[in-house]
Amino acid sequence: MAALADVINALETAYPPALAESWDAVGLVCGDPAEGVEKVLVCVDPVTATVDEAIEFGAQLIVAHHPLLLRGVHGVAADTPKGRLVHRLIRGGIALYCAHTNADSAAPGVSDALAQAIGLQVRGTLDPQAQHDGTGIGRIGELPAPEPFSAFVERVARALPRTEPGVLGAGDPDRLIRTVAVSGGAGDGYLAAVRETGVDAYVTADLRHHPALEHLEAGGPALVGVTHWASEWPWCEQASAVLRAAFAGNVEVHVSTLPTNPWTIRSSRENDR
């Protein structure tokens, strides 16, 4: 068994809180740093389903990517959705620790995990943090060999967990893809930076209609759109590896595979024949 404080130290060594954006809320949400930890659940979203999973697993700690309480609150009453989760966590003796934009910017971090899943060799950072060498949002990588965009979209779909929305591609199916930018999570705010890199394709989540259309009209690289959860899920194994390395044999770590996408149904109308 390890002390929660020691687990936090290992996480913050890998994902320094100083890398977090000023608006973010990272760190320990609830839990006593002096308490022991035998089992840890790692997930993207701290929601009812993953709290249920942690209770069933017997975890003393949930490590989540997304914050539970991102915006300021004046209370955590149990008759509110988030307050109810806090009460369940405390009653179950489960601590919650969140690593968000600090995990995005860390090296390695969220986008490194995404790049590795796709099979890219990372060559650089999309949006570097000037004050921290080697860190920043997004990564630029290279495939072992060029492949058509249609095959690349299939590569991404095979690399990430299945979701109902699936994987979307925007671009010429025959365009050869070798260099790729990736950004886990919502990434259309980096479209201008992506165009400047000269890569062949960009993989990210939450792409919106107008920014994506304007990007393509401006001659930008092909786009691959995935769900937010799927783009960040590979980080869970990365974070679990940090804990396994730090507490080999003393802490059991489980990666949640529960899809916490809000989208659960997809319907597409067939073309008239």
Image (cartoon, rainbow, N blue to C red):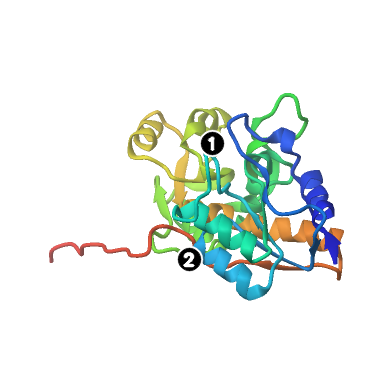
Q: Nearer the viewer, mark 1 or mark 2?
A: 1
Q: Nearer the viewer, residue 96 or 160?
A: 96
Label 2 residue SS: loop
Q: Nearer the viewer, residue 134 or 245?
A: 245
* Residue 264 figure quarter: bottom left
Amino acid at the residue labelled 1 = Gly
Q: Residues within 10 Å of mark 2 (few under 14, many from 20)?
A: few
Residue 201 location in percent, x, y?
51, 43
Q: Is residue 8 above or below residue 123?
A: below
Residue at the image position 67 percent from the left and 30 percent from the top = 128
Picture quarter with the N terminus: bottom right
Left/right of residue 249 with respect to residue 272 in the rendered view: right
Dot 1 corresponds to which residue? 72
Amino acid at the residue labelled 2 = Arg
Residue at the image position 62 percent from the left and 68 percent from the top = 54
Q: Residue furthest bottom?
A: 56
Q: Residues within 10 Å of mark 1 (few under 14, many from 20)?
A: few
* Residue 36 figure quarter: bottom right
Task: Inspect this view and state whether residue 242 appears.
Answer: yes
Residue 269 location in percent, x, y?
21, 62
Residue 104 location in percent, x, y?
64, 42
Left/right of residue 204 with respect to residue 30 in the rendered view: left
Residue 9 location in percent, x, y?
82, 48
Q: Nearer the viewer, residue 34 or 172?
A: 34
Label 1 residue SS: loop
Residue at the image position 42 percent from the left and 31 percent from the top = 219
Residue at the image position 45 percent from the left and 58 percent from the top = 261
Q: Nearer the viewer, residue 174 or 41?
A: 41
Measured in 3D between alpha carbons, the distance from the residue under mark 1 to the one under mark 2, in whole angstroms, is 34 Å
- The disc at residue 162 is 2
Q: Residue furthest left?
A: 273
